Image: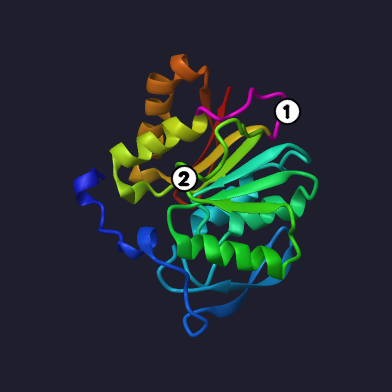
Amino acid sequence: MTDAELPDVPEHYFTGGPATAAERRTVTVRLAGRDVEVEVASGVFSPGRVDLGTQVLLRAAPTPPSTGRLLDLGCGWGPLALTLATESPEATVWAVDVSERALDLTRRNAQRLGLANLRTARPGPGGVPDDVTFTAIWSNPPIRVGKDVLHDMLRTWLARLAPSSGDADGAWLVVQRNLGADSLARWIEAELGESLGVRVERAASAKGYRVLRVTR
């Protein structure tokens, strides 16, 4: 499927302000092996449930590193970030998204679950400090933003990936096969392999999704 064939994504996925109390609702989802209540709202990716791609990533990725800095890139209401912060309480988890609504929900959910090790930030100036690198990055990246935006995002954040020293290190990306998972893997190898010293492997494949692992 080409970019031209991709369905439009509502602008509020990327620009929405915090949801009002009337817009927020509480749902029960399963994260880190237990059922928890979280707040969700319209205008954020996959409101009301853990989407299938994220489920595939959560099943495929190993237990995250116990310490260091971890990143959920494109956090939405926070399923990956909340899982990272729950499973690695001694690590610092950053949740990054362009949407203030998404970041507000992730903050509220971290507070609800007692996760003091989770921080939220928008990309760019004033967000994650420039000197911060990450032992592991988990992401269900926003493929529908288009190749140019997606490639710029990956080029920026994969450059912050620390050299890998364990089986759980690296960037774990889940992408639908019919939305270009294999072509994205080839692009990362071709465009970033030499400049960033990264390599890509297919870590898992399930339910129409690929999980790619990128290591330095």
**Residue furthest toward the left?**
4
Give the crowd class for mark 1: few <14, some 14-19, many >=20 residues within 10 Å: few
Q: For the C terminus, which image quadrant?
A: top right
Say which residue label 2 marks: 123
**Horizontal arrangement in the rendering, residue 66 relative to residue 173 (left or right):** right
State the predominant SS element of the stretch in magenta.
loop
Compared with 91, 188 (above or below) is above
Say which residue label 1 marks: 166
Please, what is the three-letter code of the amino acid marked with disc 1?
A: Gly
Q: Nearer the viewer, mark 2 or mark 1?
A: 2
Earlier-in-chain disc, 2 versus 1: 2
Please, what is the three-letter code of the amino acid marked with disc 2?
A: Pro
Q: Answer whether residue 15 is visible to the viewer in this image.
A: yes
- Secondary structure found at label 1: loop
Q: Based on the displayed image, in which of its 4 quarters is residue 148 positioned?
A: top left
**Horizontal arrangement in the rendering, residue 98 relative to residue 112 (left or right):** left
Q: Answer whether residue 50 is visible to the viewer in this image.
A: no
